[in-house]
Image: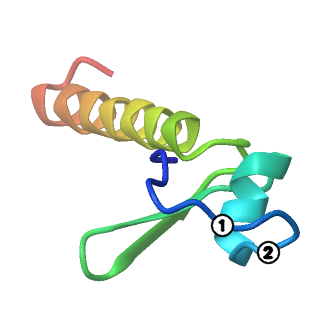
Amino acid sequence: MEAKEDKKPAGTEIAADEADEVGGGTATATVGTCVSVSSTQATTGQALIDIYDGAVEVTTHVMERVTGKS
């Protein structure tokens, strides 16, 4: 979550996505136009790391199948 420059008065309601990030809610990221990937990690950063690790795993699997090394 980026630091917000605009200061809100005490007691001002924040957006639901901001509350989820601060409170450790579920982070979801959409990749591409037709693929939706979600992670139950508390932060968007950790969710993106999980998505990247999954993409590497899938790519490795496909490369092993294509080369006959699986």
Disc 2 to disc 1: CB gap under 8 Å: yes
Q: How many C-alpha atoms fall within 10 Å of the one at disc 2: few (<14), some, or many (≥20)?
A: few
Report the side of 26 relative to 67 (left or right).
right
Q: What separation in Å lies between label 2 and label 1 (alpha carbons)?
A: 6 Å
Kind of residue at badge 1 = Lys
Choose top left, top right, bottom left or bottom right for residue 58.
Answer: top left
Report the side of 68 relative to 30 (left or right).
left
**Can residue 26 be seen by looking at this rendering?**
no
Q: Which mark identifies residue 12?
A: 2
Which residue is at the front of the view, 38 or 43?
Answer: 43
Choose top left, top right, bottom left or bottom right for residue 68.
Answer: top left
Question: Dot 2 lies on which element?
Answer: loop
Report the side of 29 relative to 33 (left or right).
right
Q: Which mark identifies residue 70?
A: none
Choose top left, top right, bottom left or bottom right for residue 14.
Answer: bottom right
Kind of residue at badge 2 = Thr
Give the farthest residue toward the left.
Answer: 67
Name the residue beneath numbered marker 1: 8
Residue in view at x 66 percent, y 66 percent: 8
Q: How many C-alpha atoms fall within 10 Å of the one at disc 1: few (<14), some, or many (≥20)?
A: few
Give the vertical position of 52 relative to 25 (above or below): above
